[in-house]
Image (cartoon, rainbow, N blue to C red):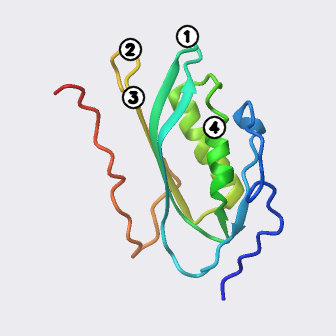
Amino acid sequence: MPNTDVSGLSMLGSSAEIATKPEDAVLERVPAGHQGTDYVVRFTAPEFTSLCPMTGQPDFAHIVIDYIPNEWLVESKSLKLFFFSFRNHGAFHEDCSIYIAKRLIELLDPKWLRIGAYWYPRGGIPIDVFWQTGKPPEGVWLPDQGVATYRGRG
């Protein structure tokens, strides 16, 4: 039977504060119940927001994170609150995207992780940021992230 011990979690099932900056956001993890089985976990955040560090105007992204767990899974409420912590945070698209991935790697030590950050246009140019930790394990079903490239009115 999978280990589902959630006794150490501080946010799940209770009211939680939203951090004012990503470095202060608490990410929590739970034991992966199927260690030894390679499977992909996907989180999609279609309404991610942060601020332009130069103008202070809002930036919007559709973020897709895929990872293959090792011993841990990210607790989804803590991930949602982590994403919220970017709402008043000024950083470039690339910085936000890679920071998210690196925080998850630090927390989870997954077998593999990739992030696709599909940013909506700023100044008429959409910026997409893609990164992964290496090749995924053989035999893992890895679906396309399903986000179309930006087309505007075309």
Q: Secondary structure at mark 2?
A: loop
The answer to whether residue 71 of the structure is visible from this angle is yes
How many residues crowd mark 3 within 10 Å: few (<14), some (14–19), many (20+)? some
Q: Amino acid at mark 3?
A: Tyr
Q: Would you name the residue on which mark 3 appears? A: 120
**For discs 3 and 4, the disc positioned in front in the rendered view:** 4
Q: Would you name the residue on which mark 4 appears? A: 84
Q: Secondary structure at mark 1?
A: loop
Q: Position of residue 84 (x, y in %)?
A: 63, 37
Q: On the rendered structure, is 36 left or right of 114?
A: right
Q: Would you name the residue on which mark 2 appears? A: 123
How many residues crowd mark 2 within 10 Å: few (<14), some (14–19), many (20+)? few
Q: At 66% from the left edge and 89% from the top edge, which residue is drawn?
A: 1
Circle nearer the N terminus (4, 2): 4
Circle nearer the N terminus (1, 4): 1
Q: Residue furthest left?
A: 154
Q: How much space separates mark 3 and mark 2, taking CA atoms? A: 10 Å
Q: Residue furthest top?
A: 55
- Mark seen at residue 55: 1
Q: Amino acid at mark 2?
A: Gly
Q: On the rendered structure, is 59 left or right of 154?
A: right
Q: At 46% from the left edge and 70% from the top edge, which residue is drawn?
A: 137
